[in-house]
Structure formats: C-alpha cells, structure tokens
C-alpha cells in the first residue's frame, strides 16, 4: 500500500513541510509502506528539487483513478489533512 501526498494545491512550502514529508516517508518505510508525491505544484516542485527530494521520492504527475478499498467499489480513498500543513492532503491508496 502507498500513502499519496497530493501537492497540487500547495502555494508555500518550507523546511517544516519537508521535515513532515521525510518523517512520514521514514515511518511508512518502517512499516513496509511507501510515500508517493502526486502532482506537485510549481512551488512544491521547486522546493523538492532544491532539497533534491525529486531524486528520492516516488512522484507521479497523476496516478490515475484510485483503487477502491475492498468491499467499497468506486469509493476513493479518504483524504486526511495534516495539521499545520496547508495544502497537504494524504490519502491511502
């Protein structure tokens, strides 16, 4: 399973946001999961490139339709807002 971070609505990112992404990636990796960055905005893309995270984070322009959870055909994953991180939304894939 992957956790998808949709960065399409991000207008501003700073080092605290990068730290949150890296902590999430580390936590997920320890559980055998992965973090995927989806549709980074120009501002998000610039910061990811500055920190060279574009080389180590899985990123997709648009992952296409979400897989439905078992037993719930057609329902997309439930996004969860990260407190204090405007524009970041997580969804399990």
Image (cartoon, rainbow, N blue to C red):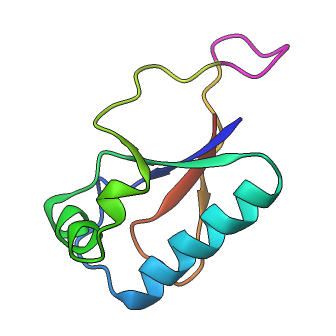
Q: Residue at image x 51%, y 58%?
A: 89
Q: Is residue 57 above or below residue 19?
A: above
Q: Residue at image x 31%, y 58%?
A: 54
- Image quarter where the C terminus lies is top right
Q: How many numbered marks does the figure carry?
A: 0
| Secondary structure mostly seen in the magenta stretch | loop
- Left or right position of 84 against 69: left
Q: Position of residue 84 (x, y in %)?
A: 53, 84
- Left or right position of 82 against 33: left
Frontmost residue, 70 versus 36: 36
Q: Position of residue 9 (x, y in %)?
A: 29, 59
- Image quarter where the N terminus lies is top right
Name the quadrant containing residue 87.
bottom left
**What's drawn in magenta, residue-wise?**
68-74
- Tell me, yes or no, if residue 51 can be seen here: yes
Residue 71 included in the magenta stretch of the image: yes
Q: Is residue 28 above or below residue 87?
A: above
Q: Position of residue 57 (x, y in %)?
A: 44, 54
- Left or right position of 81 against 70: left
Residue 39 included in the magenta stretch of the image: no
Q: Position of residue 17 (x, y in %)?
A: 44, 80
Frontmost residue, 48 versus 13: 48
- Tell me, yes or no, if residue 7 can be seen here: no
Q: Is residue 71 above or below residue 84?
A: above
Q: Is residue 67 above or below residue 40?
A: above
Name the quadrant containing residue 51.
bottom left
């Amino acid at each position: 399973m992957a956790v998808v971070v949709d960065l399409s609505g991000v207008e501003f990112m700073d080092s605290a946001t990068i730290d949150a992404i890296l902590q999430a990636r580390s936590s997920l990796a320890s559980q055998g999961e992965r973090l995927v960055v989806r549709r980074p905005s120009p501002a998000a893309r610039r910061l990811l490139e500055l920190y060279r995270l574009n080389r180590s984070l899985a990123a997709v322009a648009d992952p296409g339709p979400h897989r439905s959870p078992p037993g719930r055909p057609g329902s997309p994953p439930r996004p969860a807002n990260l407190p204090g991180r405007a524009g970041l939304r997580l969804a399990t894939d």
